[in-house]
Image: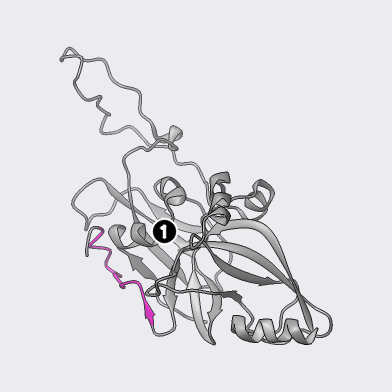
């Protein structure tokens, strides 16, 4: 399946992603051998953040006042730690952007909402074992979303699946209930799996006894990038990280 890369402007992306995942977007890098899914590219500030210890430069000796900003030698190389397994490419510099910006390209994952195709990226998870298994950042505070009404949506994954099956989500951007924080449910068929592309059809099958649904108590941060015929603005030239 061939899909375009989606260039997420920094402002657009941060507006759609949960706060717990922002720090990792500035530090994530790495490679992924899975070329079957489309990818999404987002701008990332190259300046160090609280979670970017490998990128922190030691202050240089200076004769300026005590409040002077530390400096970094022009030829000093920044080390980058791989944080998220879904990152397929990155750059610490971007010639088209005015400022210390880089970019991160994420693997997108296929899903469904009300019989429409959606694509999302994965960043954080509230469960340590799940985060390690899936190559995500462990953010335990995400589980607190389950205690606040309207702070999460549902996402259904399939233990066995028919051809073309993706995860089912219960909201998309543009709806009043949209959030990238999803409570994961696992689905298991009692017989041969069938393709299900909406929560309504899934609940009907559950009522009919052809499948079971189990809540996991795990909350993940999976911002949507494309939904149906809509999606985040495409910026293949990567020229507007702060665009509206």
Residue nearest the viewer, comparing 169 with 93: 169
Which residue extends farthest left? 64
Judge the density around disc 1: few (<14), some (14-19), many (≥20) Cα neighbours within 10 Å. some
> Residue 233 in magenta?
yes
> Residue 113 in magenta?
no
Q: Is residue 228 above or below residue 121?
A: below
Residue nearest the viewer, comparing 8 with 155: 155
Residue nearest the viewer, comparing 237 with 135: 135
Point 47% across, 61% down: residue:
106
Q: Which residues are magenta?
A: 230-241
Apparent side of residue 54 relative to residue 10 in the rendered image (left or right): right
Q: Which residue is mark 1?
A: 17
Point 37% across, 38% down: residue:
49
Q: Position of residue 41 (x, y in %)?
A: 38, 63
Q: Is residue 194 above or below residue 7?
A: below
Residue 28 is at least partly visible in this image: no
Q: Position of residue 84 (x, y in %)?
A: 53, 52
- The secondary structure type at the circle numbered 1 is loop
What is the chief secondary structure element of the magenta stretch?
loop
């Amino acid at each position: 399946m061939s899909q375009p890369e989606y260039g997420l402007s920094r402002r657009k992306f941060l507006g759609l992603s949960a706060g717990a995942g922002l720090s990792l977007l500035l530090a994530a890098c790495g490679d992924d051998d899975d070329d079957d899914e489309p990818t999404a590219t987002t701008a990332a500030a190259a300046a160090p953040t609280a979670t970017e210890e490998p990128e922190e430069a030691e202050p240089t000796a200076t004769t300026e006042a005590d409040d002077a900003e530390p400096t970094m030698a022009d030829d000093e190389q920044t080390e980058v730690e791989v944080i998220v397994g879904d990152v397929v490419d990155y750059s610490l510099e971007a010639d088209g952007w005015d400022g210390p910006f880089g970019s991160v390209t994420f693997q997108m994952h296929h899903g469904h909402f009300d019989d429409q195709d959606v694509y999302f990226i994965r960043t954080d998870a509230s469960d340590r074992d799940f985060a390690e298994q899936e190559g995500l950042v462990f953010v335990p505070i995400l589980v607190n979303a389950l205690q606040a009404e309207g702070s999460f949506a549902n996402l259904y994954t399939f233990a066995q699946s028919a051809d073309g099956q993706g995860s089912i989500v219960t909201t998309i951007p543009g709806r009043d209930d949209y959030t990238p924080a999803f409570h994961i449910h696992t689905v298991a068929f009692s017989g041969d799996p069938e393709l299900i592309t909406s929560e309504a059809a899934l609940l009907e099958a559950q009522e009919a006894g052809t499948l079971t649904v189990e809540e996991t108590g795990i909350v993940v941060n999976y911002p949507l990038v494309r939904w149906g015929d809509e999606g985040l603005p495409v910026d293949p030239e990567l020229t507007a990280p702060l665009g509206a």
